Image (tube, rainbow, N blue to C red):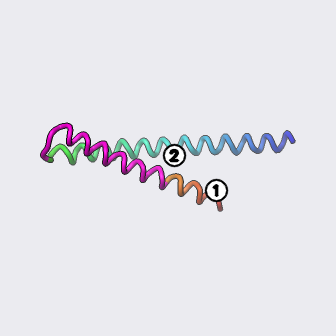
Amino acid sequence: MGRYREQLQDEAEDALEEGIDQAKQVAADVYRTASEEVGRQASSEGTLADRVSDVVRSTADKTDEAVRRKLSSSAAEREQ
């Protein structure tokens, strides 16, 4: 039983490390997307509040897409 426990613990640690790495990648993607969107919005018309709202909305959408892609690819890798 000790060996099985160690195996489960190792698998849990690996999954945690993978999750942390994926979270870091998503955070980097969010930062890049927000930076790009700010640059794009800088030249558009509208109030500052409108532009910030557009940046936040765009970043949230792209973050959602990135998280879903990461989760899908992780699930596919585990199935193999």
Q: Amino acid at mark 2?
A: Gln
> How far across and down, in percent of the image, does residue 57 sit?
31, 46
Picture quarter with the N terminus: top right
Q: Amino acid at mark 1?
A: Arg
Dot 2: few (<14), some (14–19), or many (≥20) neighbours within 10 Å? some
The residue indicated by pointer 2 is 22
Residues at marks 2 and 1, CA–CA distance in whole angstroms: 14 Å
Q: Residue furthest right?
A: 1
**Magenta residues, start to end:** 45-69
The residue at 20%/37% (across/down) is 49
Q: Are marks 2 and 1 in contact (CB under 8 Å)?
A: no
User: In the picture, residue 56 is in which quadrant?
Assistant: top left
| Total residue callouts | 2
Q: Which mark is residue 78?
A: 1
> How far across and down, in percent of the image, does residue 58 sit?
31, 48
Dot 1: few (<14), some (14–19), or many (≥20) neighbours within 10 Å? few
Q: Main secondary structure of the magenta part?
A: helix
Picture quarter with the C terminus: bottom right
> How far across and down, in percent of the image, does residue 21 sit?
53, 43
Say what secondary structure mark 1 lies in: helix
In the image, 54 versus 25, the foreground residue is 54
Say what secondary structure mark 2 lies in: helix
Answer left or right for 31 relative to 49: right
Answer left or right for 48 relative to 62: left
Comes first in the chain, label 2 or label 1: 2
Answer left or right for 41 relative to 68: left
